[in-house]
Amino acid sequence: MLLIRGGRLIDPKTRTDGLKDLVIDGERIAGVLDPETDRSARHAENVYDEVIDAEGKIIIPGLVDVHVHFRDPGLTYKEDILSGSAAAARGGYTTVVCMANTRPPVDNPETLTAVLRKAAGAPIHVHTVAALTRSLKGKELCDLALLRKLGAAGFSDDGMPIMDSGLLRDALFRAKELDALISLHEEDPALIHDAGVNAGEAAARLGLRGAAPVSEYSMIARDCMLALSVQAKVHIQHVSSALSAEVIRAAKKLGARISAELTPQHLALTEGALSAKGTLAKLNPPLRTEIDRAALIEALRDGTIDIVATDHAPHSSEEKNRPFAEAPSGVTGLETALGVCLTGLVDQGHLDLMTLIEKMSLAPAKLYGFDAGYIAPGGPADLVVINRDQPWVVSDFVSKSSNSPFIGETLSGRVLLTVCRGRIVYRDGAFRYTGRHG
């Protein structure tokens, strides 16, 4: 058994915010106790395998990320399921959902089964979506029923938009029958001249035409209306523009069953970051203007955008060091996400801590129906201890890749301890407030 004592527990499901002792027995939470009134119920501390003193620290549910790329199979020089899981644990994540654009893609029973078999050995909960269309080509639907039966969490061709409206409508009807979620990457290639940079000042400095926001919000508008007509669940990935948020807001008011996510990089950075960070700030959809960033934060605050997801996209240094037009898009994000959000949202007064934790744990867990994102007796022993007051500088990574635009930045809120299934899966080397008994 494990005892974590005296920490400030923040739980978005029960709206708890107060000092608590947590008793963990096996993979479940055995007790959430008041340090004063329930001290006798905690028993003698020598019955525990380990006692962790969390006084002055914050205890939150394990974070849930519905959008990661672990590059496994096929591109494991960038990341694999085990290295990605280690990076997630260091960042406070205990549950992740991998995307299907691997090599080969997760569009068949054999690849899906292999990924899930490897995921079963990870230190955290690793799920995966399956591809919506065969080979991610947007031409023919996969066998959605079979892939769902075999364990696919949902379906997505992330990285590739579904251009055939009729095909997507058919997919929505099928997913509705299966009670499955479809997640969509919303960029119209016909409206993109140069991927990875906003059509504006940053593109002009690079001598490029860039990708205009209309390439995103025109697709979102179409797909929100398709979702409304079918009444199927649709999740909009990595929203980047102000008008996209307005389209989602309007569609929700009309009754569309849609949800949306915002990445830490889009809430913290603008296209101006390309001047200093170069290809480390190249991503799809691209970083946009300060007007867009402010509108996205407001959309997160008012509930138009439901979730913070990292879109963790590791690439090698050799790839990112290529000329801008040749370098791949994406950033590694699991290890910095919580710090970026605490620094950019809570410290700046945009969100309170309870709301941020909800959007990074309980809300994404609900999206897929996972038993996660909360701390309560009988619930899963997936949690994180953080030092809210400890600033830290982004410098090194557990991930195989280090393609982060936040290198050298000072962030607030350091992850000290991550527990998944009742086991410590990450412990900061400086966190010494522990004692062993028994």
Image: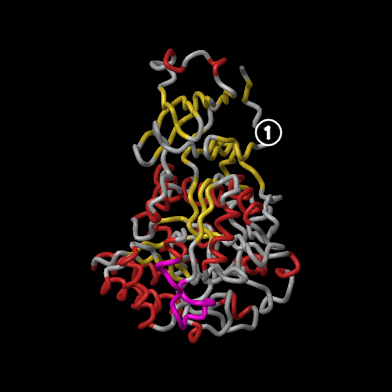
Q: Overall secondary structure of the magenta stretch?
A: loop
The amino acid sitting under disc 1 is: Ala
**Which residue lies most toward the left here?**
254
**Which residue lies most toward the bottom here?**
190
Q: Where residue 376 sits in the image (x, y, percent)?
A: 39, 34
Instruction: Identify the element where label 1 is drawn.
Output: loop
Placement of the C terminus among the 4 image quadrants: top right
In screen coordinates, is 432 left or right of 218?
right
Q: Where residue 126 sits in the image (x, y, percent)?
A: 54, 52
In screen coordinates, is 60 left or right of 305?
right
Magenta-span inclusion, residue 7: no
The answer to which quarter of the image holds residue 163 is bottom left
Q: Residue at x 64, y 83 (%)?
A: 207
Q: Residue at x 58, y 82 (%)?
A: 194
Q: Where residue 437 sits in the image (x, y, percent)?
A: 62, 18
**Which residue lies most toward the right here?**
318
Seen in the picture, residue 385 relative to 68 is either above or below; the reply is above
In screen coordinates, is 125 left or right of 255?
right
The answer to which quarter of the image holds residue 257 is bottom left
Dot 1 alpha-carbon crowd within 10 angstroms: few under 14, some 14 to 19, many 20 or more: few
Q: Where residue 84 sits in the image (x, y, percent)?
A: 62, 54
Q: Which residue has dot 1 on it? A: 430
Magenta-span inclusion, residue 140: yes
Residue 336 appearing in the image: yes
Q: Residue at x 59, y 23 (%)?
A: 49
Region in magenta: 132-146
Residue 268 appearing in the image: no
Seen in the picture, residue 97 relative to 426 is either above or below; the reply is below
Closer to us: 234 or 413: 234
Seen in the picture, residue 21 relative to 130 is either above or below; the reply is above
